[in-house]
Amino acid sequence: MAKQKTFTLDEAQTLVPVLRSLIKRAMDDKGVIEAVEKELLDLKHRILLSGGLFVDIPAVARRRAERDKAFQDIKDTLAEIEAIGVQVKDLDIGLLDFPCAVDDEIVLLCWKYGEEKIEFWHGMEEGFKGRKPIDERILRGKKKEKPN
């Protein structure tokens, strides 16, 4: 098993601008998927209620293609974020966690879309509701020096 990538607070903070852009793109794509799904469901409902109606097949096909592209774009964006070593926890609110080694334990630096910078952390089992403000332990966390 590969060793988990960890970040110092400074390293994680440096990534926030690019991650903000990536997670926003994925959140927007999720909105496209949800809108198209609602349109298709509404269309199906109207067809059932009316016993059939004229359907603009090319328009429906275009919307389905938009949905499929948005779905693929989300998969690609999430893979890009995870390749950096950052964990996507909630796409609805744009919640990301950065593993961080502190005093020989791994904690998660926690950032949510809309926040200016990383100001919270939580333990591996605590999750978003267990977020605590960054404290001195996190601030002094440094990368361990690799032996020569």
Image (cartoon, rainbow, N blue to C red):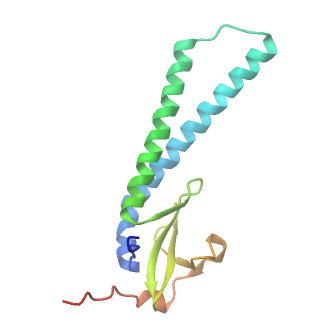
Total number of numbered labels? Answer: 0
User: Between 137 and 4, which is closer to the camera in this rendering?
Assistant: 4
Displayed quadrant of residue 35: top right
Residue 59 as seen in the image, left or right of residue 140? right
Residue drawn where x is 66% and y is 7% of the image: 54
Kindly give the residue lying farthest to the top in the view shown: 54
Q: Give percent across and percent down for residue 56.
A: 58, 11
Displayed quadrant of residue 12: bottom left
Residue 68 as seen in the image, left or right of residue 16? right
Kindly give the residue lying farthest to the left in the view shown: 148
Q: Give percent across and percent down for residue 146.
A: 26, 87
Q: Give percent across and percent down for residue 60.
A: 56, 19
Displayed quadrant of residue 95: bottom right
Q: Is residue 127 above or below residue 95?
A: below
Residue drawn where x is 45% and y is 40% of the image: 72
Q: Give percent across and percent down for residue 100.
A: 44, 79
